[in-house]
Image (cartoon, rainbow, N blue to C red):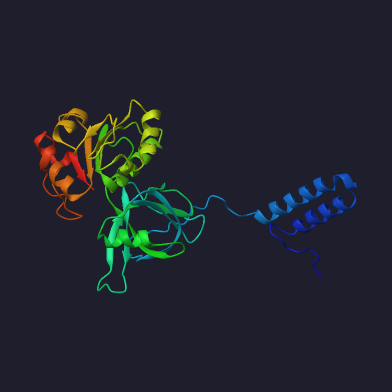
Amino acid sequence: MNRWVKYGGGAFAVVFVAFGIARAMTTEPEDMDKAKAEFDNNMAQIRNRGKTTDKPPNKVFKGGDQGWVDLKLESVEEINHNTRKFRFAFPDKDDVSGLQIASALLTKYKGPEMEKPVIRPYTPTSDEDAHGHIDFVIKRYPNGPMSEHLHSMDPPQRLDFKGPIPKYPWEPNKHDHIALIAGGTGITPMYQLCRAIFSNPADKTKVTLVFGNVAEEDILLKREFEDLENTYPQRFRAFYMLDKPPEGWTQGTGYINKDLLKQVLPEPKVENIKIFVCGPPGMYKAISGMKKSPQDQGDLTGFLKELGYEKDQVYKF
């Protein structure tokens, strides 16, 4: 009869375990804790022998024909009077989103009295490699069926997601200087770009942000952008415009206008620049013109056209 028992890494493991037990039995009482810790460590090594620790994490969103993914709402955080941060949990704590820079996700909701589901795209504000969850900062719009539904949700309700929906493919140093023109929650894809650029030491891209809002409390992610300004003063600048500025406000007032853009944007004749635009329809019409469809950027019009920029220098999220 074969008295060797195969366990974990091989037959020698039994001898290894027996040696640990015998050592513990002959150890002085004051050394028992140390012996036990050593024994537990030896057992852990045996159990882990042959296991790999470099397995890539599972990507929740795979695109293609994957279909909709149902996620549980984990927490809700108040940002201001009409904006909340929503955290949705992945099926496993080690999962990652699978999103690239820049990309978004679709959300789907069908109320009991709706004939068709409402589908809206949102750009996450959490890191693409964050494990176990995904975050969104979402403003509630009157008569906006998806934003109103989200703001009515409580943990652990669930929501359908699909993606990723690719937008502008970013690579380090793809452009020397980029400008981000945003209004309201149009800031989220801009923040996604900034995270990618400034979290990569090899990326030396300069960034200028122009961000329009109604009031100061509507400036989303302001603390994060202030941190970038303080950390990278030679590479990141932010300019804010408010329709209703508070007393003592030192930056711009009113809508984003042609004069401001002329002052702060990189010159149109400078090589290798890119201007990104994202915001409400009125802002698009004034600054760059509307997209014709998700696949068709449409003609360049508005302030950017008047300032001499070319269509291929502008991307509309």
Quarter of the image with the N terminus in it: bottom right
* Picture quadrant of residue 314: top left
Residue at the far top in the pictured view: 234
Query: Across the whole image, how many numbered discs are drawn on residues?
Result: 0
User: Which residue does the image show at 63% across and 54% down from the upper left?
Assistant: 50
* Residue 183 screen position, x and y as percent: 24, 44
* Residue 270 screen position, x and y as percent: 18, 29
User: Which residue does the image show at 27% across and 55% down from the upper left?
Assistant: 141
Left or right? Give the position of 186 relative to 9.
left
Q: Is residue 198 above or below residue 53?
A: above
* Residue 92 screen position, x and y as percent: 50, 59
Whether residue 202 is visible: no
* Residue 82 screen position, x and y as percent: 33, 51
Left or right? Give the position of 309 relative to 86.
left
Front-most of residues 73 and 176: 73
User: Which residue does the image show at 33% across and 46% down from the upper left?
Assistant: 101
* Picture quadrant of residue 157: bottom left
Left or right? Give the position of 28 relative to 92.
right
Whether residue 219 is visible: yes
